[in-house]
Image (cartoon, rainbow, N blue to C red):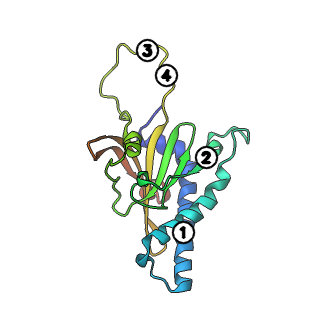
């Protein structure tokens, strides 16, 4: 299975566009609730993030269809809650977990576009995977290799003024101690959402 940025973006395009729409709706809902009550979102960032997550989760629920719908692999993706432990990248109530037959996509809010330190075993396991570009040929390769493991991806978002300002797809490539290594990092706002004319 191809794990290059172009291949992954093409494979997940419908899902990525739907997540963008869901998060955009979420930031709009959060801004409206804060405005209606005269609240400052920066006074309680967790509430702001939770409202965005909740709206996005509701909008993505229909995509939890079973494979019998019409055979489209996109429709077989499942929405799951990301756990609320420290595996949530230090962003309480902002995470979503989406699975397709080929990929596991964790959706998190990240103001700086960086993946947090590999501080827990859950994060270390998520970050650990082979690079998308093989550096050596394996001449003793098994003629029937095992079924490939799903690719691990992080979709990082941020917002300002009820508009998404970050929508980055990141493929982790392991870790050294607590330091995360990144296989590749793509700005989807420029590549997918606002492509050059």
Q: Earlier in the sequence, mark 2 or mark 3?
A: 2
Which type of secondary structure does the marked residue at label 4 adopt?
Answer: loop
| Residue occupying the far front of the picture | 85
The one of 67 and 126 positioned closer to us in this rendering = 126
The image quarter in which residue 66 lies: top right
Mark 2 vs mark 3, foreground winner is 2
From the top left corner, tell me how far across and down residue 105 is, in percent. Answer: 49, 47
From the top left corner, tell me how far across and down residue 88 is, in percent. Answer: 44, 54
Mark 1 vs mark 3, foreground winner is 1
What residue do we see at 53% from left, 59% from top?
20
**Residue 78, numbered label:** 2
Question: Where does label 4 land, which residue?
Answer: 146
Q: Residues within 10 Å of mark 4 (few under 14, many from 20)?
A: few
Which type of secondary structure does the marked residue at label 2 adopt?
Answer: strand
Which type of secondary structure does the marked residue at label 1 adopt?
Answer: helix
The answer to whether residue 41 is above or below residue 63 is: below
Question: Where does label 3 land, which residue?
Answer: 142
From the top left corner, tell me how far across and down residue 59 is, in percent. Answer: 63, 60
Residues at badges 4 and 1 in contact (C-beta under 8 Å)?
A: no
Residues at badges 4 and 3 in contact (C-beta under 8 Å)?
A: yes
**Residue 51, numbered label:** 1
Q: Earlier in the sequence, mark 4 or mark 2?
A: 2
């Amino acid at each position: 299975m191809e794990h290059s940025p172009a291949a992954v973006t093409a494979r997940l395009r419908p899902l990525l566009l739907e997540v963008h729409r869901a998060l955009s709706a979420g930031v709009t809902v959060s801004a409206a609730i804060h405005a209606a009550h005269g609240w400052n979102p920066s006074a309680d960032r967790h509430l702001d993030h939770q409202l965005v997550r909740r709206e996005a989760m509701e909008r993505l629920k229909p995509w939890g269809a079973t494979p019998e719908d019409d055979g489209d692999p996109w429709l077989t993706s499942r929405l799951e809650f990301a756990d609320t432990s420290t595996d949530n990248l230090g962003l309480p109530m902002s995470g979503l977990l989406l699975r397709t037959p080929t990929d596991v996509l964790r959706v998190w809010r990240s103001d700086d576009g960086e993946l947090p330190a590999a501080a827990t075993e859950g994060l270390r396991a998520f970050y650990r995977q082979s690079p998308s570009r093989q550096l050596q040929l394996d001449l003793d390769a098994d003629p029937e290799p095992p079924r490939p493991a799903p690719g691990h991806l992080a979709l990082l978002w941020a917002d300002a003024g009820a508009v998404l300002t970050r929508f980055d797809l990141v493929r982790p490539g392991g870790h050294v101690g607590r330091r995360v290594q990144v296989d590749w990092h793509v700005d989807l706002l420029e590549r997918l959402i606002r492509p050059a004319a």
